[in-house]
Structure formats: C-alpha cells, structure tokens
Image (cartoon, rainbow, N blue to C red):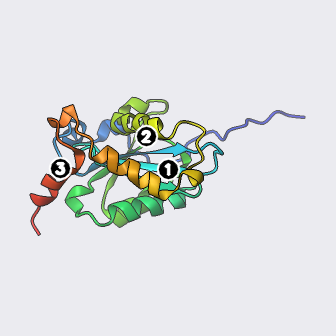
C-alpha cells in the first residue's frame, strides 16, 4: 500500500502578505490600530479562545470559540473590531493556522490589511504571545474553557486590560487606548 503524507502540502492560506511588508509605524508601535491575533486551544482540542491585542496600547480582547473553524474566528473578530473607527483597525497580523483562511473577507468588512508571520516564527507577533503567557497563568494548558465559563473569561480580560505596564509608563491598556479614542474626531 503506498504511503500518503499525513499533512497537506502547499499553501493553505491564499494571498498571504509577509509581516516584513507591515508598515514601519506598526512595527515600531508608533501608530494606532495595528492588531495581532492568535488562538489558545482548549484541553479537548475542539474549541478555544481568540486573543486580539492592539500593538501600541496592548489592549486585549478575549473571545470564546465554540469550534476552531475559520468561519467562527472571522465572526468573533468581526464582532470585536467592528465598533472601532477605521483609524483604529488598520491591520491584523496572523500566524499560519487554518483558522485564518478567511482573512480577506475580514479585510473587506473592516477595511484592514492582513500580514502573516513566517512559519514557526511566533516572535514576529510578540505582543499576543506575551499576553498568551499571561492568560495561561489563569487557564493552564489542558483547561476546558466550557467549564471556565464566559464570566471568568471576561474577568481575565478586564484584569489584563487594567494591569499597569512598564512599557506604557505604568499606565493601563484601557487608559492608553482611551486616550487614542478621545483624540479621534467624532
């Protein structure tokens, strides 16, 4: 019997743009509205959490994912970012997971640009990886997020966003992001 490769080969995500092409202002954290995203997988590997982090303010959004599909990820991210003005949703940096295949539909709905890390280069979206480490203090690997519940996930999000950060001159992400929203017209 001929052996077949276990994994699909080739490009799974269409029209990927490398993170190397991300604007310099986004990379240097000089501009607002550049986001990073990742998914934390639950203990049963069937559901997870979507984590969104704004690069300049470190504002974090945690959203429960009932399944790990691209449609569920797109829906959750659209719900979380849709209320912001265009100046606060300029780009999103992804990893190469299959949950990010609908990035073009998200770009059309939000008016954003997509950038992707190189395979196995998680440090290219370091903000969200740092936040994932903080989330894992509350929800260690193997945790079933159904048992934790939405109230606890919201509480963790609030704690992370009210935590003073040295990189923000000991201000909280909420304070810094509020300044950005207050500086915007209308």
- Residue 41, by quadrant, is top right
Residue beneath label 1, please?
49
Decide: is 185 above or below 51.
below
Q: Position of residue 158 (x, y in %)?
A: 33, 51
Q: CA distance from mark 1 to mark 2?
A: 10 Å
Would you place residue 112 above or below residue 122 in this image? below
Residue 156 in view in this figure: yes
Residue furthest to the right: 1
Q: Position of residue 63 (x, y in %)?
A: 45, 55
Find residue 135 and name its label: 2
Residue at the image point whose x is 90% and y is 34% from the top: 1
| Upstream in sequence: badge 1 or badge 2 | 1
Crowding near the residue tagged with mark 2, few <14, some 14–19, many ≥20 C-alpha atoms within 10 Å:
some
Q: Secondary structure at mark 1?
A: strand
Q: Nearer the viewer, mark 1 or mark 3?
A: 3
Which of the two residues, 78 or 100, is positioned nearer the viewer here? 78
Counting from the top left corner in percent of width and height, residue 24 is at: 21, 38
* Placement of the C terminus among the 4 image quadrants: bottom left
Dot 3 corresponds to which residue? 175
Q: Is residue 68 at least partly visible in the picture? A: no
Contact (CB < 8 A) between labels 1 and 2?
Answer: yes
Mark toward the start of the polypeptide (2 vs 3): 2
Of residues 176 and 185, which is closer to you in this image? 176
Disc 1 from disc 3: Cα separation: 24 Å
């Amino acid at each position: 019997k001929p052996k077949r490769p276990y994994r699909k080969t080739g490009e799974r995500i269409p029209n990927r743009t490398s993170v190397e092409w991300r604007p310099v202002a986004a990379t240097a954290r000089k501009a607002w509205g550049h986001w990073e995203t990742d998914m934390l997988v639950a203990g049963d590997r069937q559901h997870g959490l979507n984590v969104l982090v704004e690069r300049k303010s470190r504002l974090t959004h945690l959203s429960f994912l009932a399944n790990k599909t691209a449609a569920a990820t797109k829906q959750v991210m659209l719900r979380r970012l849709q209320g912001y003005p265009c100046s606060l949703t300029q780009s999103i940096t992804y990893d190469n997971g299959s949950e990010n295949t609908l990035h073009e539909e998200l770009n059309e709905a939000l008016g954003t640009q997509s950038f992707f890390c190189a395979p196995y280069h998680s440090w290219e979206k370091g903000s969200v990886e740092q936040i994932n480490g903080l989330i894992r203090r509350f929800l260690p690997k193997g945790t079933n997020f159904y048992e934790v519940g939405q109230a606890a996930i919201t509480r963790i999000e609030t704690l992370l966003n009210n935590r003073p950060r040295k990189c923000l001159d000991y201000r909280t992400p909420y304070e810094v992001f509020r300044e950005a929203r207050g500086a915007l017209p209308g």
